[in-house]
Image (cartoon, helix red, strand yellow):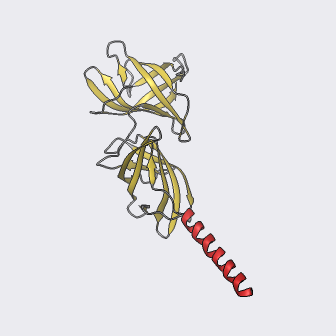
């Protein structure tokens, strides 16, 4: 009887250990167009669970990058872990599930490089680029930056990044200063339009991102301040879009 009881206990422990081990196998990295989730990142002998948000750094060859939102030690394992090399600042993500609206669009890979001295840690997205980058204008509360993936200026299209600033002569008390702008071939169903004659900037749809979570979107209008250098814009209005 004692032998039988001991065997039952042993089998129970083995089953419990197996279930626990199976439960700690983390899913692959995922990207929903705004947030990059890395359930397992190998950093030397340590493993971290990290979350990063999409940004628009100045020196990225793709125009995009990521800022570290959260990182904590983990004991989980992964079949396709990300790897960060502190010496080179390189991050290799071998498999990323790309989603849109909760629907999987397939998998890809990504390469990031740490921006030296950045705090919080920021990474540029290296070539050849990353799938499913948002083509919608987005405002990030944590960095007070506005990213405009597609801006029509006459017959040309630009990708631009702006920074929120206080502006006394603006009806909202707010404005933006242009930080980056470059030509782009990207298309968008909600592209921004800049009227070169009136200086009016129309933003039909802007995602509002706070702590990596989408808030109520807005539409917005801005106007160029003539003679400003770098270019500055008054924020005229930004009513919420009822969904």
Q: Position of residue 127 (x, y in %)?
A: 30, 49
Q: Residue 220: horizontal and vertical position, in percent?
A: 47, 21
Residue at the extreme top of the image, as rendered: 198
Tell me which residue sits at (38%, 42%) in the image: 64
* Residue 177, x across and y down, in percent: 43, 29
Q: Residue at x 33, y 50 (%)?
A: 126
Tell how many labels.
Answer: 0
Q: Residue at x 36, y 26 (%)?
A: 189
Q: Is residue 66 above or below residue 205?
A: below
Does 66 sit left or right of 212 as displayed?
left
Q: Nearer the viewer, residue 140 or 94?
A: 94
Does the rendering let one see residue 88? yes
Residue 50 in the image, given as x and y percentages of width and height: 51, 54
**Snapshot quadrant of residue 84:** bottom left
In this view of the protein, can residue 114 be seen by the observer?
no
Indicate whether 63 appears above or below 225: below
């Amino acid at each position: 009887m004692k032998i039988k009881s001991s065997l039952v206990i042993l089998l129970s422990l083995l089953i419990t250990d197996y279930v626990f081990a199976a439960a700690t196998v983390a899913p692959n990295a995922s990207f929903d167009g705004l947030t990059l989730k890395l359930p397992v990142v190998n950093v030397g002998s340590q493993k971290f669970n990290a979350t990063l948000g999409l940004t628009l750094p100045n020196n990225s060859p793709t125009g995009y990058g990521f800022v570290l939102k959260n990182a904590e030690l983990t004991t989980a394992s992964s079949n396709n872990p990300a790897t960060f090399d502190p010496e080179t600042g390189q991050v290799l993500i071998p498999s990323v599930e790309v989603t849109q609206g909760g629907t999987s669009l397939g998998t890809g890979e990504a390469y990031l490089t740490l921006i030296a001295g950045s705090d919080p840690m920021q990474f540029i997205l290296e070539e050849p680029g990353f799938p499913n980058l948002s083509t919608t204008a987005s405002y990030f509360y944590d960095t007070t930056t506005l990213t405009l993936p597609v801006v029509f200026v006459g017959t040309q299209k630009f990708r631009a990044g702006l920074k929120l600033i206080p502006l006394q002569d603006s009806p909202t008390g707010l404005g933006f200063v242009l930080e980056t702008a470059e030509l782009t071939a990207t298309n968008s169903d909600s592209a921004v339009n800049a009227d070169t004659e009136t200086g009016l900037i129309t933003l039909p749809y802007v995602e509002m991102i706070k702590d990596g979570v989408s808030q109520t979107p807005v539409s917005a209008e801005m106007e160029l301040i003539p003679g400003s250098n770098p270019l500055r814009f008054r924020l005229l209005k930004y009513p919420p879009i009822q969904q």
